[in-house]
Every structure is written in C-alpha cells, then in structure tokens.
Image: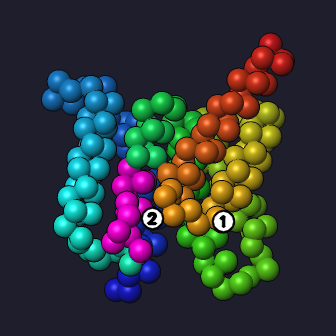
Amino acid sequence: MQPEIFRRIVHMAVPLSLVFYWLPEQVFQVQKVHGLLVFCCLVLLFECIRLKSNILFPGLRDYESKRIGSYAWAAMGLTFAYALFPLQWTGPVVVCMAFIDPFAGELRKKGSRMYPVAPLAVYFLLFTAVYFLIQKSLEPALLFLVAVAASVSVALEYPKLYHLDDDLILIAAPLLSIWLLEKVLLFIFA
C-alpha cells in the first residue's frame, strides 16, 4: 500500500476514537480521563524515543523524521478535546478533521478551483449532520457556530507550520471558537 493512501486511511479512522465517550467513567478503578492522559503521555514518550532514535516508520512523512509526528499532534488534540469538551461538539469536530483535512489536501495538491469552497461546504454539512445524529435536534444558533467552526478550520488547514501540525489545530481551533462564541452569545442573549 502506498504511504499516502495508508496515511489517509489512518486519518479517516480517527473518529473511531470517539468510543471514549461511551466508556464507563471508571475502567479498572481508573477514571477514564486519567486513562486518556496516561495514553497521551505514552504516545508522547514513544514520540520522544522515536525522535531520539531517528526512526521513521511507515506512514510518517520524510520531514517528520526530525520533528513531532502528526499522530502525536493528533493524540494531543484528541486528549484536549475529550478531556474538556462534550460529545455534541467534539464528535462533529473530530469527524470533520478526519475527512476534511485529506479532502482539502487532495484538492489543493491538484490545484482544484473547488478549494476552499468545497471543503468549507462539506465541513458545514458534515458537522451539521453529525451534530444532529448526536443531539437529535438543531438549534438556529448552531448554524452560525458551525459556519464559524468551518471557516476557522478551513482557513487554518491551509498554512503549513513547521512546529505545529494541523491534526492538532483542526481539533483545538474549532472547539475553542465554538466555546468562545457560545459564551459570547449566552452573555449577549441571556
């Protein structure tokens, strides 16, 4: 299997981690959020060892031989999301990150004129659909929050930052923007 296809498949499998929300609060007498933090620390420890050993295993890009791998960034983003945000927001954001990032990347790589409009539209529709599946309802204010989250995500997916991977950004930035906007809207309209 080509490395690019392998990376895309792994990326699109990330939403399977949402099973975290259905785990019991305690597993083997350990709070699930503590288990999540331990798992993230283990991923980061593995990443430190990998970087010190100069190992590049299948699925990593060449430039990741000297910097933190995208899987470690994703682990940090997922830990941040799962520890601090409810499923109603994290579910759609994680699903959108898993599918929109590869989709936008392919469009950009091919020089498609559909970029960034298509990723923006798909993000909006996918987020709304996943939110509805989780909540079984749609509030009018949600559409504004989704439009902002989609815009933030697609805008931040484009720049390639050396010291920060979009697998973290595409989880943290929309969640923080939703959280902040939700607080502002509640303050204004309460």
Dividing the picture into quadrants, the one containing residue 61 is bottom left
Position in image of residue 74 (x %, y %): 43, 54
Dividing the picture into quadrants, the one containing residue 2 is bottom left
**Whole-Å distance between the Cαs marked 1 and 2?**
17 Å
Q: Is residue 87 left or right of residue 68?
A: right
Residue that numbered label 1 is attached to: 158
Identify the magenta region. 63-75
- Residue ID at (45%, 38%): 80
Q: For the C terminus, give its image quadrant.
A: top right
The kind of secondary structure the magenta stretch mainly shows is helix
Indicate which disc, 1 or 2, sits on the residue closer to the N terminus. 2
Tell me the kind of residue under disc 2: His
Position in image of residue 165 (x %, y %): 50, 59
Q: Is 157 rendered above or below residue 135?
A: below
Residue nearest the observer in this picture, 7 or 91: 7
In the structure shown, which secondary structural element does the residue marked by tag 2 occupy?
helix
Please report contact status of discs 1 and 2: CB closer than 8 Å, yes or no.
no
- Residue ID at (23%, 50%): 45
